[in-house]
């Protein structure tokens, strides 16, 4: 498979260039002629000179490291006309230094000297704290890849090079590529050539993101929920709630609190892949979700029961988004189950409705948002969008 129309490369970066190759270069059996210059630049932390010396070598030389080796193959063998390279480096000193060296190398290397090189440090992607790495580092990696490929028309122009970095990092990069239909390149140190993982005909059921958008929104804010708190968000009988929990559990990570022996749930890296994949593929509202005709102002049922702050919030929400046809209040008993301003799709009288909640001081309320398009795609998009943007209303 050739990549003649793909000119954006997203590359995960490891530490093999420094730790595996340059650190013990003096003891290597296959030292290049300029090995002393390379070694001195490395020891002196002179990344500009180090890059200049590496440029003198054949880019397929193993000493150059996995990132340079694979990018050379992507250019020469896969015919990718690279214009932009994004290096995703770990949140460590070695990661940053490796990124600086790679930027110098590809900025000044003649075969692709017009390439624009970007370094992205992935916060908390480090090996000193396994929990931070698992819960936050890998999720931040997913977010950053999503941001890059969502820019402009990058989704159809991107390649992912998943050779460098931690094994879990590589696995996540491969998963994102498969789901977003982006070719993924990989080269094992024993392989002579890179291999590619062509996109597979797989997809997520994104209706879950709408049905449980309020739960996913809390998890994305790095909150944790107990099992019972999770069940309180779900509709149906206790048996039905437990069945739903088992469905969304694949996107969660369990954290045991030793002091209380209590299990808390957080969003897993795969959960972040699920959310990021949706937003990358559907960054804009469905074409059917257009400004509503003959819009109807919000109504509040028994008017005197609602505080003015709540009315002002609803009015502003209705005014800001023209694809909202109308908003009206609904039963707001069980106020303790209302946690804040959140949105999700709920089954009401056998119909799927976009339901919002509001919490201020001791007052809580629920309301239904009628859209110009009542289809499931529009409802899902609006639920996710509003959860991310309500604080700007």
Image (cartoon, grey):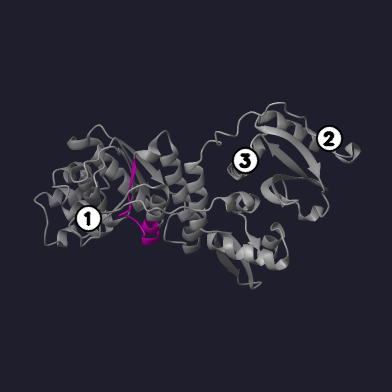
SS for dot 2: helix
**What range is drawn magenta here?**
158-171
Frontmost of labels 1 and 3 is 3
Q: Residue at x 67, y 61 (%)?
A: 230
Look at the image and say whether residue 221 sits in the magenta stretch.
no
> Which residue is identified by label 2?
308
How far separated are the C-alphas under marks 1 and 2?
Answer: 67 Å
Q: Which mark is residue 127?
A: none
Q: Secondary structure at mark 3?
A: helix
Q: Is residue 31 left or right of residue 133?
A: left
Assess disc 1: are there few (<14), some (14-19) or many (≥20) residues with their C-alpha within 10 Å of its C-alpha: many
Residue 346 visible at all: yes
Dot 3 crowding, Cα within 10 Å, few <14, some 14–19, many 20+: many
Report whether residue 91 is seen.
no
Where the C terminus falls, by quadrant?
top right
Residue 157 spot, x, y in % from top left: 34, 38
Comparing 295 with 32, the one in front is 295
Residue 22 - label: 1
**Residue at the spot 27% in from the left edge and 44% down from the top edge:** 102
Circle 3 residue: 382
Q: Can you name the residue that lies furthest to the left here?
A: 33
Q: Please name which of the two marks, 1 or 2, marks the residue nearer to the observer.
A: 2
Of labels 1 and 3, earlier in sequence is 1
Residue at 38 percent across and 37 percent down: it is 154
Q: Quadrant of residue 155?
A: top left
Residue closest to the far top? 294
Judged left or right of residue 126, residue 323 is: right
For label 2, the crowd category at 10 Å Cα-Cα, with few meaning under 14, some 14 to 19 and many 20 or more, is few
Residue 213 at x, y percent in the picture: 62, 50
Q: Does residue 360 sit above or below 136 in this rendering?
A: above
């Amino acid at each position: 498979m050739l990549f003649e129309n793909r000119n954006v490369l997203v590359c995960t970066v490891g530490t093999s260039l420094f730790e595996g190759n340059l650190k013990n270069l003096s003891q290597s059996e296959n030292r290049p002629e300029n090995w002393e210059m390379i070694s001195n630049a490395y020891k002196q932390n002179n990344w500009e000179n180090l890059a200049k010396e590496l440029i003198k070598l054949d880019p397929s030389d193993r000493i150059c490291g996995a990132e340079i080796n694979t990018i050379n193959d992507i250019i020469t063998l896969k015919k990718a006309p690279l214009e932009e390279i994004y290096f995703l480096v770990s949140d460590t000193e070695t990661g940053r230094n490796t990124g600086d060296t790679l930027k110098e190398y590809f900025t000044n290397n003649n075969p692709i000297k017009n390439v624009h090189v970007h370094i992205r440090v992935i916060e908390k992607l480090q090996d000193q704290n396994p929990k931070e790495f698992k819960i936050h580092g890998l999720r931040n990696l997913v977010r950053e890849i999503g941001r890059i490929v969502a820019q402009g028309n990058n989704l159809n122009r991107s390649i992912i090079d998943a050779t460098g970095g931690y094994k879990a990092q590589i696995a996540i990069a491969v998963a994102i590529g498969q789901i977003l239909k982006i070719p993924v390149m990989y080269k094992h140190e024993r392989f002579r050539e890179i291999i590619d993982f062509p996109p597979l005909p797989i997809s997520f059921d994104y209706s879950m993101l709408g049905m449980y958008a309020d739960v996913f929104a809390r998890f994305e804010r790095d909150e944790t929920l107990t099992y019972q708190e999770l069940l309180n968000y779900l509709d149906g009988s206790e048996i039905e709630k437990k069945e739903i929990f088992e469905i969304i559990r694949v996107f969660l990570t369990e954290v045991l609190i030793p002091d209380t022996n209590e299990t808390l749930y957080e969003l897993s890296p795969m959960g972040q892949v699920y959310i990021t994949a949706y937003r990358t593929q559907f960054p804009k509202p469905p074409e059917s979700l257009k400004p509503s005709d003959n819009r109807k102002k919000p109504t509040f049922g028994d008017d005197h029961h609602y505080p003015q702050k709540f009315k002002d919030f609803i009015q502003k929400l209705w005014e800001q988004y023209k694809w909202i046809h109308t908003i009206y209040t609904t039963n707001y008993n069980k106020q303790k189950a209302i946690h804040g301003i959140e949105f999700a799709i709920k089954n009401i009288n056998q119909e799927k409705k976009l339901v919002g909640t509001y919490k201020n001081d001791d007052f809580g309320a629920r309301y239904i948002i009628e859209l110009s398009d009542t289809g499931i795609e529009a409802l899902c998009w609006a639920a996710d969008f509003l959860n991310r943007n309500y604080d700007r209303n």
